Amino acid sequence: MDTHVSAEMGIRSRQRLCLPFAFVYLFVVSLETHLTIAVDSISPVQSLSGSQTITSQGGNFELGFFTPGTSRNYYIGIWYKKISEQTVVWVANRETPLLDTSSELKISEDGNLVLVQQSNIAVWSTNSASGTRDSTVAKLLDNGNLILRDASNSSVIIWQSFDHPTHIWLPGGWFGLNKITGERQVLTSWRNSEDPAPGPYSLEIDPGGSSEHFLMRDRSIRYWGSGEWNGRIFSGIPEMRLYYIYNFSFIDDDKAKYFTYSVYDPEIITQHEIDESGQIKQRTWLESSKRTLGKSSNVHWANQATYIDG
Ligand SMILES: *[C@@H]1O[C@H](CO)[C@@H](O)[C@H](O)[C@H]1NC(C)=O
Ligand SMILES: *[C@@H]1O[C@H](CO)[C@@H](O)[C@H](O)[C@H]1NC(C)=O
């Protein structure tokens, strides 16, 4: 009995002794993780894995692994760094979830940005570059656009996430048709709040239309149209006149035709989303300055508008 008790006490005191070391160890490890990738770029000598992230220069957006809701699947995504509610704006491997974070996001030997598993199998790739390993770098911009560019000439952009939006259209992003490559931007809903794989609803500009407007589809069936663009608003969305915070424009030149928008007040955090129920939502992040005893009140996404009633 006595020996048992003293043995247990021995273990306890050893545990107590170890604790400060554990803290120091954890501190050093987390310091190291944050020091390794405290930048906005992924280069051939700097890949990303585990809990590492990169942050855009002004601190608006962050890129790394995330798990949606209570899902156990991991995805590479981009989310707002400055707001408290995790809000993912773009997903790389939306159809190929990973079971852990042992994969690596890196520049491959052919210059593409790839997500590879330990076995070096590519789960996702930008699939665009034809350069060599030393010639590209991926950079997360402060507007949420992830670009893959030539390392020696920053004006040569090989691939960018704004050309491949998932479910969200951010200010500064575009939405339309590349006349040279034939590539179109199509926003597609998530399957549900825990599965970013493409759901049934999609939004695109009318590919065959003579006038400019948006089309919403449920699988392939059209179920909503925005009406024609009159230079300021769509005829089918008269409410647009009320939303003074956005500056929409339609660009049509020899390379592309697309819609884009900016926000008059660049401090406003806002987005357009195709949600899982097939609605187009304009959402704005509201952060009231009022605080109630240690916890900030009224911090949430507010729906500015829903284009399609459901
Ligand atoms: C960078 O690329 C652009 C576009 O291809 C080209 O016009 C420019 O001359 C290049 N600059 C250098 C320094 O090579
Ligand atoms: C609205 O956007 C267009 C196109 O980007 C730009 O030329 C124009 O100056 C903007 N208007 C205002 C008031 O910011």
Image: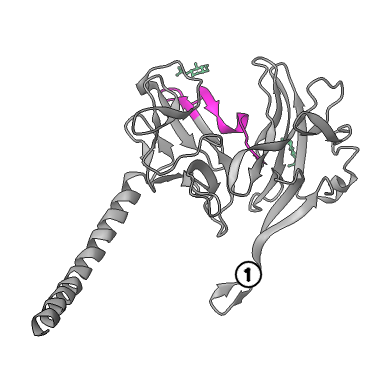
Count of labels shown?
A: 1
Residue 262 falls in which quadrant of the image?
Answer: top right
Residue in view at x 54 percent, y 47 percent: 79
Residue 205 lies, in percent from the top left, at 77, 28
Residue 78 lies, in percent from the top left, at 53, 43
Report whether residue 222 is seen.
Answer: yes
Task: Using residue 235 as the reference point, say whether residue 79 is left or right of it.
Answer: left
Task: Using residue 69 as the reference point, say whether residue 115 is left or right of it.
Answer: left
86 or 117: nearer the eye? 117
Q: Is residue 65 magenta?
A: no
On screen, residue 16 above or below 55: below
Residue 103 falls in which quadrant of the image?
Answer: top left
Q: Is residue 160 magenta?
A: yes
Number of residues whose C-alpha sits closer than 10 Å to that of mark 1, classed few (under 14), some (14–19) or many (20 or more):
few
| Colouring of the image | one colour
Residue furthest left in the image: 3
Residue 19 falls in which quadrant of the image?
Answer: bottom left
126 or 309: nearer the eye? 309
Identified by mark 1, the residue type is Ser
Highlighted range, magenta: 148-169
Give the labeled residue for mark 1: 289
Residue furthest bottom in the image: 2
Residue 29 lies, in percent from the top left, at 27, 54
Report whether residue 287 is seen.
Answer: no
Cβ(mark 1) to ligand 2 < 8 Å?
no
The secondary structure type at the circle numbered 1 is: loop
Task: Answer with the quadrant where ligand 2 appears in the image.
Answer: top right
